[in-house]
Amino acid sequence: MLRWQAGYATMGVPPAAAPIAFTLLTLPVTGSAQSGAGLVTAMTAAQIIAAVPVARLGRRFDGVHYLRVLVAVRALALAGFTALAGTGAPYPLLVAAVVAAGAVNGAAYGVQRTLLNHLVDPRGLPARSASRPRSTRRRSP
């Protein structure tokens, strides 16, 4: 369980660092800080569009192994982006690299959350938010 928590906590580091990293890496390539924002938008859109289809592709595989593949693909895509930016590659290639990373990143969150169901009894997971009352009955004034 501790490994799952650590893994889930660190999954968010690359997307959280993306706005600054993309801006710093694309500024010398394109000459504009707005190009970094475009890359963040492309990565976010890829996460939204591809999360469910990519996660469904892994249904027939072992969840842990599929998660490792997704994380490896994301790492390779981000490393490729860094290498492309370092060589001054054209902006469309940079977009392609972050789209590849984003496409698997959204699915990785879902797969990792699904793995939690195998670690913890579902009855032990929170079913309600703290802001929602347990009872649906109205109290009389």
Image: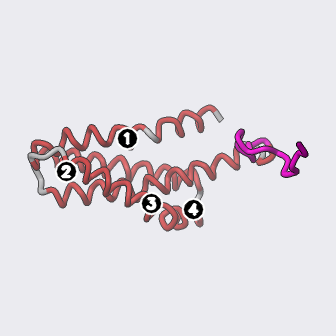
Toward the viewer: 64 or 74?
A: 74
**Residue 82 lies in quadrant:** top left
Kindly report the distance in space between the C-alpha atoms of the residues bearing marks 4 and 1: 25 Å
| Residue drawn at the location 66% of the way across and 46% of the way down | 116
Whether 103 is among the magenta residues is no
Whether 134 is among the magenta residues is yes
Kindly report the distance in space between the C-alpha atoms of the residues bearing marks 4 and 2: 37 Å
Secondary structure beneath disc 4?
A: loop
Provide the residue span drawn in magenta. Answer: 124-141
The colour scheme applied to this rendered structure is: secondary structure
Find disc 2 in the rendering and name its residue.
35
Toward the viewer: 31 or 123?
A: 31
Find disc 1 in the rendering and name its residue.
14
Find disc 3 in the rendering and name its residue.
48
| Residue drawn at the location 63% of the way across and 52% of the way down | 114
For the residues labelled 2 and 3, say whether their Cβ atoms are less than 8 Å apart. Answer: no
Q: Compare marks 3 and 1 and give the one earlier in the sequence.
A: 1
